[in-house]
Amino acid sequence: MTIDVTTHYFAVFRERAGCETEAVSTSSHTAAELFEEISGRHGFADKRDRCKVAINGALARWESAIESGDEVLFFPPVAGG
Amino acid sequence: MAAKFAITSDPIDPDALKRSLEAAQAGACVTFEGWVRNLNEGESVDALEYETHAAIAVSEGETVIAEALERFSVVKAECVHRVGLLAIGDCAVWVGVSAEHRGAAFDACRYIIDEIKNRLPIWKKEHYGKGATAWINCATQ
């Protein structure tokens, strides 16, 4: 069963993807699975454990379930300060 | 107790921010300023560009400040992070803590800057001579 989500990319991920946001139909059911799928398609070079994910505006765990209509934000390794 | 974290695209004014830490019971004030430097890992840097997801950065930044207030015996703690295109010497981040005693002020200030750097969705792109750029901490292809 596929679900429809919207993905959002930031910094180096946005540059690699060539867009800020995408409508994605996926058979992934967790944020981690979706990341691996998207990462492979766009050639993201950073390992998942160095990145972060937010779902519907709040930081989330990689094992979080995703559902149709979710806004999934992928954050590359951070570098504040 | 005041808890405050902000993202700004305007220049940071450390003197003005420091005044907000004043309190009659505070005997110590520790501040930290992160500045844009002209050299990183041997590369000459012309400018730094900061990007953020502001809503999540503010939410997580406020959580960090609240944690510092809970863990350390401090009176006030604040942090401001700048985003946008910054020049060499600009203040990119400011952390300020006031406390009764210096130990807690140093510890809380260190805690806040370390957690801010590790947890907030903020990214930094270095601009080098001849138009080259690189995202810090991110893998290259």
Image: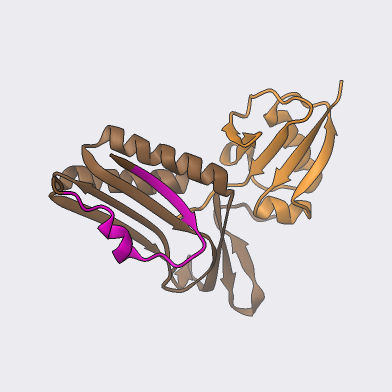
Chain colours: A orange, B brown
The residue at the far top in this view is A1
The image shows residue B6 at horizontal and vertical percentages of: 45, 51
Residue B20, located in which quarter of the rendered image? bottom left
Image side of residue A72 versus residue B19, left or right = right
The magenta segment? B3-23
Is there any visible trace of residue B120 in the rendered image?
A: no
The image shows residue B16 at horizontal and vertical percentages of: 31, 63
Image side of residue A2 versus residue B41, left or right = right
Is there any visible trace of residue A33 in the rendered image?
A: yes
The residue at the far bottom in this view is B130
Image side of residue A32 versus residue B109, left or right = right
The residue lying at 64 percent from left, 46 percent from top is A46
The image shows residue A61 at horizontal and vertical percentages of: 59, 28
The residue lying at 70 percent from left, 47 percent from top is A9
Q: Does residue A79 sit above or below B41 in this rendering?
A: above
Residue A12, located in which quarter of the rendered image? bottom right
Asked whether residue A73 is drawn in magenta, I would say no
Q: Does residue A44 sit above or below A69 in this rendering?
A: below
Q: Does residue A4 sit above or below B27 in this rendering?
A: above
The residue lying at 40 percent from left, 39 percent from top is B64
Quarter of the figure that contains the N terminus of chain B:
top left
The number of discs equals 0
Asked whether residue B13 is drawn in magenta, I would say yes
Quarter of the figure that contains the C terminus of chain B:
bottom right
